[in-house]
Amino acid sequence: MKLITAIVRTTCLEKIVRDLRDAGIKGMTITEVKGIGEQVELFRPYTVHRKIELFVPDERAEEISRIILEHSHTGLAGDGIIAVSPIEHIVKIRTKERIS
């Protein structure tokens, strides 16, 4: 199991979520985040982005990362990042079921 964490522009979110749902992704966590990166604007020391977090089977991590990249890449500073991390195990709290 892998955790995919993507920090993306707010303007890209709708298309990313649509294509992830079309690819069979049923759940994800989306939060508003503020960060400081390569670009710093004069009157705004941070930028607002969206963070998408989702768990996927190992064999789907590359495919899902590509979907996110396809809709978030502009070639400009501030496009964001995609990180893929290994997950040891996941437990569904409501049912106490170990998912992975």
Image (cartoon, rainbow, N blue to C red):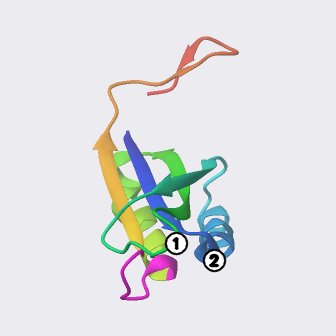
**Distance from label 1 to label 2 (Cα)?**
21 Å
Q: Which residue is mark 1?
A: 43
Question: Where 89 falls versus 50 (above or below)?
Answer: above
Magenta highlight: main SS: loop
Q: Residue furthest bottom?
A: 75
Q: Amino acid at mark 1?
A: Phe
Callouts 1 and 2 close, C-beta under 8 Å: no
Question: Where 40 falls versus 83 (above or below)?
Answer: below
Q: Is residue 68 magenta?
A: no
Q: Amino acid at mark 2?
A: Thr
x 45%, y 75%: residue: 41
Picture mark count = 2
- In percent of width and height, residue 88 lies at 32, 26
Circle 2: element type: helix
Question: Where 74 falls versus 39 (above or below)?
Answer: below
Segment tinted magenta in the rendering? 71-78
Q: Residue furthest top?
A: 96
x 41%, y 51%: residue: 4
Question: Where 1 falls versus 80 (above or below)?
Answer: above
Asked if residue 72 lies left or right of residue 10, the reply is: left
Q: Which residue is mark 2?
A: 11
